[in-house]
Image: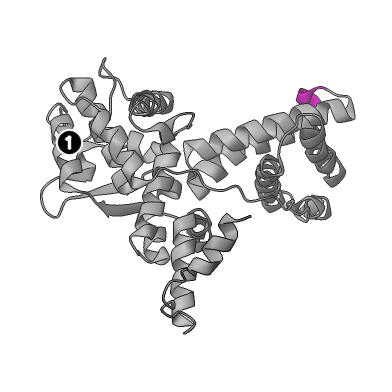
Amino acid sequence: MKRRSDDLLVQVERFFQEYLRRVRGVSDHTVRAYSDGLRLFFVFLAQHVKRSVALLGLDDIRADAVLAFLDHIESKRGNSAVTRNCRLAAIRSFVDHLLRHDVTRAEQYGRILAIPTKRARQRLVSYLEPDEVRTVIAEIRATTPSGNRDRALLLFLYNTGARVGEALALRRRDLQLERPRQVRLHGKGKKERICPIWSETATALRALVADTDGPDELIFRNARGAPLTRDGIAYVITKHVQRAAGSAPSLRRRRVTPHVLRHSCAVALLQAGVDVTVIRDYLGHVSIATTSRYLATNLKMKQDVLAAFWKRSGLDHKSDRSWRPSPKLIGFLESL
């Protein structure tokens, strides 16, 4: 007869190998995030019940332990409410998986699934204005293989709003560099979408495509020919942003990540008057609520909306002729 710990370990393996990978088809990034969350929870749980992780069982996965863990990561580890909710999402997903395979503990699991997320302050999205992005791209010296790659990479990320994982997975067969110029992106949950690309982006990518051996060859590679990594792309962006900061003071002390370029693409589309539902599909968002976050980020857009509202209300009118002080008033003021 199997021990309780065997049941838990088997379910953990099934959760990652079968449920997340095969059923939900989540990205590697999501797998890593859930793995980190559950690892922290199991370590805390082992200390909570005073047993080793190897001896934990399904009976130990209880609502009171989850609540204690959530309080621990906020009060002891100093995590924000956003991080707390992310850890809870990982635990909920695992418990939801357990419920489908172990209905005998339905009430126990149901109490965990009923734990609410904590209300958290929505952080403003960080992004670059179009002129700032142009400054960074203009700084890149496209006279070397690495310079060509860097310029193509930044143009591609800004043009398509691609996630870093989508850029890393880009292969020669995904690109159509002649009209209609477009790229097929492989997003979260194995969902695909097609994005148009600028002629400038296509020209920059042609040099990289010319160096590939076949349709399945990855596009973005390092100097040794190996695929670029997330850290590699982050390094490339940081390097060129720091160089561009010499001529663009607004870039100083800015932390620009690949996702910041994705945000920059979204805000630029909004500024151009593109409907938010179109931007949702362009970026591959599942929910319109995710895309709508960008509406709260740009002060100029808010000012434009307010000005249009004021004008539409009928309250807008030409101001009367400018007021000028009389000579008598000026003389009085000068005598003070």
Residue density around tag 1, few if under 14, some if 14–19, many if 20 or more, within 10 Å: many
Q: Given the image, on which type of amino acid does mark 1 rest?
A: Ala
Quadrant of the image occupied by residue 221 = top left
Q: Is residue 149 above or below residue 116?
A: above
- Relative side of 107 to 291, left or right: right
In terms of image quadrants, where is residue 11? top right
Report x, y in % for residue 280.
Answer: 42, 59
From the image, which quarter does the N terminus lie in?
Answer: top right
Furthest residue in direction top, as rendered: 224
Q: Nearer the viewer, residue 120 or 320?
A: 320
Please, is residue 119 above or below residue 319 in the view? above
Position of residue 291 relative to residue 60, above or below, is: below
Relative to 204, is 328 on the left or the right?
Answer: right
Look at the image and tell me whether residue 208 can be seen: yes
Q: Secondary structure at mark 1?
A: helix
Q: Position of residue 10 (x, y in %)?
A: 66, 34
Membership of 128 in magenta stretch: no
Relative to residue 175, is residue 330 drawn left or right?
Answer: right
According to the picture, the residue beneath numbered tag 1 turns out to be 204
Find the residue positioned furthest to the bottom.
Answer: 314
On the picture, is 152 further left or further right than 249?
left
Q: Nearer the viewer, residue 232 or 95?
A: 232
Residue 246: percent from left, percent from top: 35, 25
- Magenta span contains residue 55: yes
Q: Which residues are magenta?
A: 52-56
Residue 30: percent from left, percent from top: 54, 40
The prevailing secondary structure element of the residues shown in magenta is: helix
